[in-house]
Image (cartoon, rainbow, N blue to C red):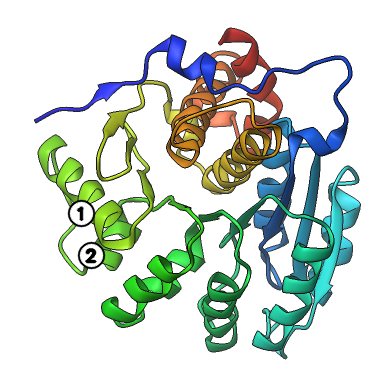
Amino acid sequence: MSAKPLSRAELKEALVERLPEDHKGVYGHVLVVAGSRGMAGAAILAARGALRSGAGLVTVASPLGVAAIVAGAVPSAMTVALPENASGVFRPDGVEKLKRYAADHKVTSLAVGPGLTTHGDAARFVLHTLSGVLVPAVVDADALNILAGQEPEGVTQLLKSRKQACVFTPHPKEMSRILRSARAEGDTARMKSVERLARDWGGVVLLKGNKTLISSGLRTVVNTTGSAALAKAGSGDVLTGLIAGLWAQMLASGRVSGDLAFRAAGLGAWLHGAAGEAAEKELTAYAATSTDLVDYLPRAFASL
């Protein structure tokens, strides 16, 4: 059992054409929900990934004590400060403000998870966000760990009742927690696990790692780009923002057809891996960081 890679032609077809008369609204609005005290970097990296994707607008929603840090680090993004608890993480009562912002500002896609922690307040915030902010969502990191800690039947019901697509981006340990099984080893086991979760949760699943797998449950492909330079903290945050930004452009512009969640995940994985290869070539796998990765995304786009 093996998965085939996406062809270069199919990857290029997923890129939204840029026309001279376009304005920022054509390229969508990404809402990044991320960060907590001591984890502002996760929100910053996800926002930078979304901006480098070509998205027209990016807003970062973060706890009150983190918002100013994010605003200073990512001036091209807007920020929304939400209530925080004594530990500096999201409180569940902030979801109403988030819902209003998403509706009032015509948010196209959501990226939720980086740097949230799994604190009880953050967990309730994530569950209410996924059930109440009904826009397509990339779900990563602590949002996945929070879902893994819930009753599986309840999570399945929540996600399938959203009526908006999700892309889930677990690394192998997160996948093991979600499936409540031993870590999948080998190509066949990894493929079975990614297809199982795609069917169980009703979305697209991107299983990170060497030879990243992307599955809709109906189709599974493998990504062939990447390097050891990606094995650094923050790389996954960049990928989350990148996929959300690519997806927002497809949705807002109407210029790409097919399963847009699947296409955004596949294209995002390819570009992310290609940026890692370019960073390693110049900076070495030792010295390249996730911050550098964002700066090499332009080369990845150019190479495609």
Please identify the quadrant where the N terminus is shown: top left
Choose between 49 and 200: the one closer to the eye: 200
- Residue for point 33% across, 61% down: 201
Circles 1, 2 touching at the beta carbon (< 8 Å): yes
- Amino acid at the residue labelled 1: Arg
Report x, y in % for residue 84: 74, 83
Q: Is residue 82 left or right of residue 291?
A: right
Depicted 301 relative to depicted 149: above or below: above
Residue 206 falls in which quadrant of the image? top left
- Residue for point 52% across, 32% down: 268
Per the image, the residue denoted by label 2 is 179
Q: Is residue 199 left or right of residue 19?
A: left
Q: Residues within 10 Å of mark 1 (few under 14, many from 20)?
A: some
Q: CA distance from mark 1 to mark 2?
A: 9 Å
Report x, y in % for residue 297: 65, 24
Q: How many marks?
A: 2
- Amino acid at the residue labelled 2: Leu
Choose between 157 and 242: the one closer to the eye: 157
Per the image, the residue denoted by label 1 is 196
**Element on which disc 2 rests:** helix
Report x, y in % for residue 291: 68, 38
Depicted 14 relative to depicted 197: above or below: above
- Residue for point 73% across, 81% down: 96
Q: Does label 1 or label 2 sit earlier along the sequence?
A: 2
Depicted 276 relative to depicted 162: above or below: above
Choose between 40 and 200: the one closer to the eye: 200
Choose between 150 and 142: the one closer to the eye: 150
